[in-house]
Image (cartoon, helix red, strand yellow):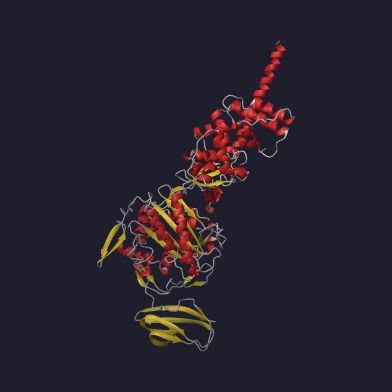
Amino acid sequence: MKPIIKTVFIILAISTLSTYFINKDAIQRYENLSSNKLIDRHNEIISLKPNPKGYIAHYESEYPQHFKDLLLQKEDKYFYYHPGVNPISILNDLLGRIGLSQRHGSSTIHQQLAKNLLSNENERDIKNKILELAYAISINIWNSKQKTLDMYLNSAYFGNQLQGLNSASRGYFDLSPNMMTDEQNLQLISSLNSPTTDNPSEDNNIKKTISLSANLKININQSRLTSTQTASQNIIKYKEIKNIPLELEKYIQAEKETALTIDKDIDNKIKESIKRNIELLETQKAKNAAVIVISFPNNEIISMTGSPDPTLQKEGYQINMLEKPRQIGSTIKPFIYLKGFEKDVRPYTILEDKEYKFTLADNSPFYPKNYDYQYHGNITAHYALSNSINVPALLVLNHVGVEEFERFLEDDLAFEPHQNIKQYQLGIAMGTLEMTPKELAHIFTIFPKSGEYQNLAIIKDQNKNQRFEKPINQQIADIKYIQLINKILSDRKTGIDQFSASSSLNLPIKNYALKTGTSHDYTDSWIVGYTPDFLVAVWVGNADASETEGLSGQKGAGIIWNEIMQIMINSPYHKNTPFDFSYIKEFYQDGTISYGLPDDEYEKNKYLLKESEKLITWPQNGDIFKYDPESSIALKSEQEVDWYINDKFISHGNRYLFKAEKKDRYKITASLDDESDTIFITVD
């Protein structure tokens, strides 16, 4: 007896172990057939990626018992009693195959589930049938009946690339499973045997449903059956869910379910705004746009748009411009002034806006120009930044030091330049530096966050987020200097000279700040605006880097930005948090208010960058002129001076036209009383 018992025990152990591993494989196959899912911060589906079969499979953890009861009445009456297979049905099937019976056995729910998981729907040979039996029995042993039913309802095919009851109910009826009527329940159940030809979008479905209701003795109202036309229209709409947003493609690859910080409702409204406005801006040769919205205090990305509509076959529409570097124009200026404030520049510091000659690292001359090609004389740093004037920004950058500012970008802001940063030099202040819209928005977060620099969050799970956003959390600027920047950027009155009183930059709230930017030849139009609660960055231009037709930051990106700010202002993300200016001191002089810090040495800071008066305002020392015996070089001064060429007196006045007799190096001197000013120029 002992050998027999031992043999039986071994057989049972092997059988049990076999069913365990078979069930484990079944569960793995089941999980692999679900669609990868992106959900927003409110658990709304953003996108479902088709599974390996090409089906949309939106799994649910539990389905209505009423639907299960109707299903079992048709498909498997003895579901709760058999061990995964129905011996009587198997016997009838075998007898039918050898011609001894006219009845063919039907598959149990367990067998149908196994068939779905093994993908044997179209290969009905004996080998596959035996394999399905093994899987059906194993599934029954290791899973509850309810779980098995739910697995079946998630894996059943309902036609039109819709797998599972959840996908089918939403696809055909635009309803969740628990909202379906009996008519709709039966429409889906009647399609299970031939889902391609009998699904609710096919004419055959109505007849099948009526027949099924009669067989099950269930009264239905035929007028409440969903028409094939309605079902077909619903499918088209539902299948849009498999269109993965261009900006989010990389996030759906990682996990079966990824919860994002995106707000789907807000994101959709923003995309509609971009699409509508870019159609208008196309008349000014701007075809592309990108937008990113960030919520504070956790730097959560609420919305990302890299293309007006990636589903359209239009130029540049399949490119995610959020990730493409572009010249950022004057949006760099707040960072230059921030570093200047750390070196005693203040909003009231006088900056002389005039023509300057700067010498670059390669000793070549650089004559910066303002956006409007005008000079404004002595102006404050506050006025210069508010009106985005180039030359004063260069003076501040020169005061800070180009190398120190480069270190600030690369070390403190962890910015990785798209080209060798050394090539920009003082041109940084002129807007030649390149960043992606996402990068620019990120570094701008230091202003609404009081100098704190934190990584962006796109995935709610912090550990998963680190795969895409490098962890950063540091204080990179003193709060008091940040407050000075916020004070200037939130002052819409001072910026009227450049941007006018009535413009897209004006909003119905007071607690917001902004900076516009325009790159060379109107190629890129930028605006970054923020409140203490959220930030909106907008880029408008062309994916091929072609010029727009005169679109500045205000006239291009500003139009879209204004609408998006209005959307955000009317959302829960707007808490009307005021800016903190507690570190700032007001200074009163000549009837005007200026802003600084309590421990300022006002007079010293005010004239910090004032140059000693020069008698010669033009030309600049070291200038080189092309020799032309018919042309003259204008010598200019603000004063009535004595002019000397190579130490020889030639004229008196504030202007003299000097005609060089030959190619040579000339010494130019201007003299007034006890003062003199000397420069050297070359005529070649």
Quarter of the rendering occupied by the N terminus: top right
Q: Residue furthest right?
A: 98
Work out whether residue 466 can be spotted.
no
Residue 451 spot, x, y in % from top left: 40, 52
Judged left or right of residue 87, residue 359 is left
Judged left or right of residue 121, residue 207 is left
Work out whether residue 53 can be spotted.
yes
Please determine whether, in this image, residue 295 is positioned above or below residue 671.
Answer: above
Nearest to the observer: residue 665 or residue 107: 107
Quarter of the rendering occupied by the C terminus: bottom right
- Identity of the residue drawn at 70% across and 36% down: 124
Q: Quadrant of residue 619?
A: bottom left
Q: Residue furthest left?
A: 591
Residue 178 spot, x, y in % from top left: 48, 38
Q: Quadrant of residue 277?
A: bottom left
- Identity of the residue drawn at 54% across and 36% down: 213
Residue 578 spot, x, y in % from top left: 32, 53
Judged left or right of residue 8, residue 223 is left
Residue 55 spot, x, y in % from top left: 60, 44
- Identity of the residue drawn at 49% across and 77% down: 623
Please determine whether, in this image, residue 67 is positioned above or below residue 355.
Answer: above
Nearest to the observer: residue 541 or residue 106: 106
